[in-house]
Image (cartoon, grey):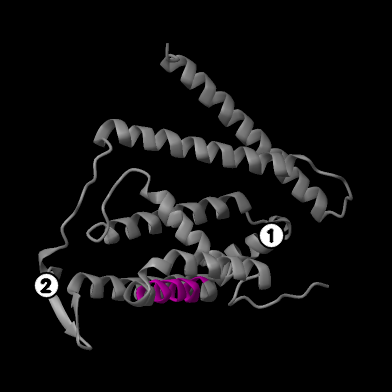
Amino acid sequence: MYPSAHAWAARLGRARAQYHSCNLCEHRCRVNRAAGEVGRCKAGPTARVFRHRVSVGYILVIEEFIRMVWGVNFRSINPPSPLAGTTELFGSTVTDYRLFIIGFGLLLSLALFFVVERTRIGIVVRAASANSAMVSCLGIDVGKVRTGVFVAGAMLAAISGVVAAPLLPLKLGMSFTIIIDCFIVVVIGGLGNIRGAILGAMLIGMMRAVGQQFAADWIFLLTYGLLIATLIFRPEGLFNVRGRTA
């Protein structure tokens, strides 16, 4: 027997209460650390682990809902008719929609780079990522900043999915394949480095494009080999700048 709707609602209520309790404990620990109190705080890691578990749970629930509504078959979308043609470029035939994706991705990357590096919002986001306790002492709600970043990331992911839909087969679980590629790009480019993420994505894309032409059987080996070499010899990322340690 499956739990009733009332039972699921009660479980969700308890999960939300525990979630907010963990957030409150973590905030108190940040304040104590910022005030100079040398106390050992166990609530921070617990809150983070619980948030990760809740996030994974929500992902599984959403995927099961998609499976129930749309099924597990592949879906495909045709590109818009104005972009359905082809163009001769440097002796090769390229579809107009791929050229549109290149231009769209370039504009979106430049806009994201400008927001993160040249606006007050980007300064707050980078500061909250580097030292959330100090940002909290300045009167900025770090929780709202992180929520805003999560919402912005979800919006960018949705836009990217819509734009890439005419090129990729739509299927349940395709997000995990994309997440692996994103993980590789972030590790190679450097965690928290927007320039490194862009350059890392270009490096992986060019490596796979050239590999597809000359060594198709070695594409994944080369990609993961670069990832392993980065983790061993330069774990801060190929395009990241070493920061001060004191």
Alpha-carbon neighbours of circle 1 within 10 Å: few (<14), some, or many (≥20)? Answer: some
Q: Quadrant of the C terminus?
A: bottom right
Q: Quadrant of the N terminus?
A: top left
Q: Nearer the viewer, residue 215 or 226?
A: 215
Q: Nearer the viewer, residue 3 or 117?
A: 3
Q: Is residue 43 left or right of residue 3?
A: right
Residue 50 picture location, percent across and down? 62, 37
Q: Quadrant of residue 226?
A: bottom right
Give the residue type that dot 1 points to. Answer: Val
> Along the polypeptide, which appears first: circle 2 or circle 1?
2
Q: Which residue is mark 2?
A: 85
Q: Quadrant of residue 110?
A: bottom left
Q: Residue at x 87, y 46 (%)?
A: 39
Q: Quadrant of residue 231?
A: bottom right
Q: Which residue is mark 1?
A: 135
The answer to whether 114 is drawn above or below residue 25 in the figure is below
Q: Secondary structure at mark 1?
A: helix
The answer to whether 134 is drawn above or below residue 20 in the figure is below
Picture mark count? 2
* Residue 22 shows in this picture: yes
Residue 227 picture location, percent across and down? 56, 66
Alpha-carbon neighbours of circle 2 within 10 Å: few (<14), some, or many (≥20)? Answer: few
The answer to whether 223 is drawn above or below residue 153 in the figure is below
The answer to whether residue 153 is magenta is no
Mark 2–mark 1 distance (CA, rounded to whole Å): 51 Å
Q: Is residue 205 left or right of residue 28?
A: left
Front: mark 2 or 1: 2
Q: Is residue 104 left or right of residue 12?
A: left
Q: Is residue 54 left or right of residue 91?
A: right
Q: Residue at x 81, y 52 (%)?
A: 33
Q: Which residues are magenta?
A: 197-209
Q: Residue at x 26, y 53 (%)?
A: 169
